[in-house]
Image (spheres, rainbow, N blue to C red):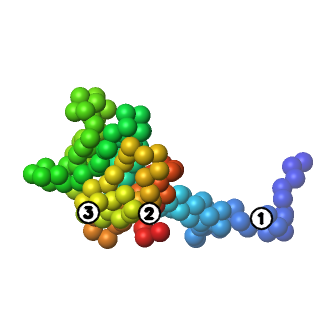
């Protein structure tokens, strides 16, 4: 004797097996939105304003040059100055007062990493277009601002502490 399901039992089977899926489930939508969010965040970080990043690199490099020259000025008791765009060397800067062999060995005079910025020098030890770095241990508060387009970054010191980098007009 074989037992065949009656018509009633067939009607009680879940109907979801027979339905055609029309759309996405909530989980699928959440996964898709998460993937898009991660991809757009990655692109946003990768496409950071190149000019701003380049100017920040210039400032960090210049801060290390100024601190090295300042340390050498103190050690040798020499009147050392940083001179941007000296003479016909537009797009370069010079360190005056240190022996040329030392300047070359320490690689203190180099061209800018990118397009030469506009330079503003302010402070007690600033003399027109030069920045005095020594020989005194206290050189007075100074600020060098590098400007490229609408990007500004400043190197500041109170005369005792090392030069630090500040973004914008801070």
Q: Examine the rendered structure and indicate whether residue 2 appears above or below residue 8.
A: above
Q: CA distance from mark 3 to mark 2?
A: 23 Å
The residue carrying mark 1 is: 14
**Relative side of 133 to 99, left or right:** right
User: Visible in this render: residue 165?
Assistant: no
First along the sequence among labels 1 and 2: 1
The residue mark sitting in front, 1 or 2, is 2
**Relative side of 49 to 100, left or right:** right
Q: Could you tell me which secondary element the residue under label 3 belongs to? A: loop
Identity of the residue drawn at 44% across and 63% down? 167
Q: Quadrant of residue 102?
A: top left
- Image mark for residue 128: 3
Q: Position of residue 100 (x, y in %)?
A: 22, 33
Identity of the residue drawn at 29% across and 48% down? 81
Q: Is the Cβ of the residue at disc 1 closer than 8 Å to that at disc 3?
A: no
Q: Could you tell me which secondary element the residue under label 1 belongs to? A: loop
- Marks counted in the figure total 3
Choose between 170 and 142: the one closer to the eye. Answer: 142
Q: Position of residue 151 (x, y in %)?
A: 34, 66
């Amino acid at each position: 004797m074989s037992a065949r399901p009656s018509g009633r039992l067939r009607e009680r089977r879940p109907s979801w097996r027979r339905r055609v899926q029309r759309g996405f489930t909530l989980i699928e939508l959440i996964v898709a939105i998460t993937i898009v969010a991660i991809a757009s965040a990655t692109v946003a970080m990768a496409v950071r304003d190149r000019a701003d990043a380049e100017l920040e690199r210039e400032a960090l490099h210049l801060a290390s040059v100024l601190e090295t020259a300042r340390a050498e000025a103190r050690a040798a008791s020499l009147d050392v100055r940083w001179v941007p765009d000296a003479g016909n060397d537009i797009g370069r800067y010079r360190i005056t007062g240190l022996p040329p062999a030392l300047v070359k060995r320490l690689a203190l005079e180099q061209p800018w990493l990118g397009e030469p910025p506009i330079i503003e020098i302010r402070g007690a030890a600033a003399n027109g277009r030069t920045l005095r770095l020594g020989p005194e241990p206290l050189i007075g508060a100074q600020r060098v601002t590098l400007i490229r387009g609408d990007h500004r970054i400043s190197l500041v010191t109170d005369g005792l502490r090392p030069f630090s980098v500040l973004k914008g007009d801070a």
